[in-house]
């Protein structure tokens, strides 16, 4: 292990070194990634976001009394988001650094409200397709999670929901859409149940907030999911996904200020200045807020509609072409993310072959124990409209080639010393992702989680030489 270098370096050398260590990284703006990227595919949006970011990079959001423009921008960004999601003038909201932070704050608000009426451990009810950010929030906040099944259309099962509700229920969650399959839950049906039982309904529109309203205008089938549905109490909406803002940008909305009260933190019992936080994080750059503000203003409704149209074009091509080569779409996705499973080819192999061709296609391991299929996930970006034909050509070839591949005997690997088969090296990422995905699919999820924690703690996150 090495510490700081004794001498300073020159700027050029540092940047050269940065470029060198990034050599094996994919280019997030190359449009060859179908996951982990939300890129408008338009150079000027990125340029504008970078310029706006740099203008505010050095300003902190820690103390809202210091920079008046930051408060103004936050309120404007929240107003735009609330308007898009059919909020009326009583809706309030705050800027956060991401979906997980927005979700954690919503769970905290619901938990604290619950505590006013009960001493029991609060529970949140989640469809099995809800994002892990809810489980993480529950773990951090001492809340119990209750997972319910999804129906044959991959939407939260309403009968299961009814039977899961009890007097410890503090929150019910619906996704608009869920990440794995892009399916929007029946928010109206869930809201009816929540109104009857007087329960907090959070809609996770981290993925859908900035794209579903535009799909609807373009004539797509989009179920109601926002404040137009009576009973929806809070909504998470990520700017750093289909808002096309840089990472570290989300909004949490509450139907009115009474609900939000529980997530505002104030501390005036110390010798320093009063700390007032509306988010989990305290000191943070205002760069992602100013970039969000700039991109929203720049694109306007016209820009978001144009980009939504491009996404729809790609979605239609994938939905038409992929079934023809043996990939079957999962559910009836209303969103801009979709997933495919297959009975004729190992989808993890397809992903590996695509990687050799310079494409990133995300494998979703699912779980045979939970009856979740192995699948390939596509987060469609507007920029993909420029490359989709080339992509389909390569995908066809990858599927043909994968069909010829011999299946690995995963049970045999599990019985043996499978950790050594993974080719793990200290401080480095594992090489054989295909095998890892097979193992995740085949092993009980609790065991997978334990092994992951161990590997991440003891092997991957190890200091390496600078
Ligand atoms: C539906 C959904 N909710 C929540 C999150 C969590 O958001 P973040 O990764 O910004 O914390 C994601 C991320 O992909 C998501 O897709």
Image (spheres, helix red, strand yellow):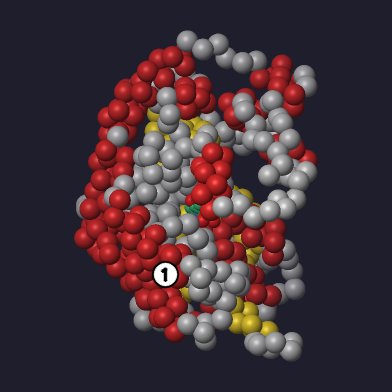
Q: Is residue 36 above or below residue 124?
A: above
Q: Residue at x 56, y 52 (%)?
A: 10
Of the 4 image quadrants, the one containing the N terminus is top right
Of the 4 image quadrants, the one containing the C terminus is top right
Q: Is residue 408 above or below residue 279?
A: above
Q: Position of residue 307 (x, y in %)?
A: 27, 51
Seen from the viewer's position, the closer of residues 131 and 224 is 131
Tag 1's secondary structure? helix
Count every numbered label the image shows and give the total. Answer: 1
Note whether ligand 1 is within 8 Å of mark 1. Answer: no
Q: Position of residue 168 (x, y in %)?
A: 67, 66
- The reply to whether residue 77 is in sight is yes
- The reply to whether residue 171 is in sight is no
Q: Residue at x 61, y 34 (%)?
A: 367
Q: Residue at x 43, y 40 (%)?
A: 27
Q: Position of residue 386 (x, y in %)?
A: 27, 38
Q: Is residue 361 above or below residue 250?
A: above
Q: Residue at x 63, y 65 (%)?
A: 169
Seen from the viewer's position, the closer of residues 144 and 419 is 419
Q: Position of residue 17 (x, y in %)?
A: 56, 43
Q: Is residue 212 above or below residue 268?
A: above
Where does label 1 land, which residue? Answer: 55
In this rendering, would 389 be left or right of 359? left
In this rendering, would 324 be left or right of 104? left
Seen from the viewer's position, the closer of residues 256 and 289 is 289
Give the class, few, some or many, for how many residues have Cα within 10 Å of label 1's Cα (few <14, many ≥20): some
């Amino acid at each position: 292990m090495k510490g700081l270098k004794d001498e300073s370096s020159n700027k050029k050398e540092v940047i050269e070194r940065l470029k060198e260590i990034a050599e094996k990284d994919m280019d997030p703006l190359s449009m060859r990634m179908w996951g982990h990227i939300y890129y408008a595919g338009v150079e000027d949006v990125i340029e504008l976001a970078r310029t706006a970011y740099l203008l505010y990079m050095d300003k902190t959001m820690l103390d809202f009394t210091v920079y008046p423009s930051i408060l103004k921008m936050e309120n404007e960004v929240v107003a735009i988001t609330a308007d898009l999601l059919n909020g009326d003038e009583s809706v309030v909201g705050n800027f956060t650094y991401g979906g997980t932070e927005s979700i954690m704050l919503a769970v905290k608000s619901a938990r604290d409200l619950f505590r006013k009426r009960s001493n029991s451990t609060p529970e949140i009810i989640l469809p099995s397709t809800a994002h892990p950010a809810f489980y993480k929030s529950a773990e951090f906040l001492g809340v119990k999670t209750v997972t319910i099944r999804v129906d044959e259309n991959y939407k939260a099962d309403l009968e299961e929901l009814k039977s899961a509700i009890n007097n410890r229920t503090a929150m019910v969650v619906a996704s608009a859409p869920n990440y794995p399959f892009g399916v929007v839950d029946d928010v109206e049906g869930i809201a009816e149940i929540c109104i009857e039982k007087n329960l907090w309904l959070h809609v996770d529109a981290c993925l859908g907030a900035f794209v579903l309203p535009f799909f609807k205008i373009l004539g797509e089938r989009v179920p109601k999911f926002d404040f137009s549905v009576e009973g929806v109490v809070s909504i998470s909406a990520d700017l750093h996904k289909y808002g096309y803002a840089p990472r570290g940008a989300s909004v949490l909305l509450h139907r009115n200020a009474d609900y939000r009260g529980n997530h505002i933190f104030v501390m005036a019992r110390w010798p320093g200045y009063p700390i007032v936080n509306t988010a989990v994080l305290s000191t943070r750059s205002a760069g992602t807020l100013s970039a969000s503000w700039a991109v929203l203003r720049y694109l306007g409704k016209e820009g978001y509609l144009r980009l939504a149209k491009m996404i729809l074009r790609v979605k239609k091509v994938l939905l038409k072409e992929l079934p023809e080569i043996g990939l079957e779409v999962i559910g009836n996705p209303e969103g801009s993310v979709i997933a495919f499973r297959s009975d004729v080819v190992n989808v993890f192999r397809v992903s590996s072959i695509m990687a050799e061709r310079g494409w990133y296609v995300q494998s979703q391991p699912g779980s045979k124990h939970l009856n979740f299929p192995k699948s390939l996930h596509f987060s469609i970006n507007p920029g993909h409209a420029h490359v989709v034909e080339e992509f389909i050509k390569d995908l066809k070839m990858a599927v043909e080639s994968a069909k010829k591949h011999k299946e690995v005997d995963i049970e045999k690997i599990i019985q043996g010393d499978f950790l050594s088969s993974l080719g793990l090296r200290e401080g480095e990422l594992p090489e054989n992702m295909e095998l890892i995905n097979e193992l995740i699919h085949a092993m009980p999820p609790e065991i997978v989680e334990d092994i992951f924690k161990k590997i991440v703690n003891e092997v991957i996150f190890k200091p390496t030489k600078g």
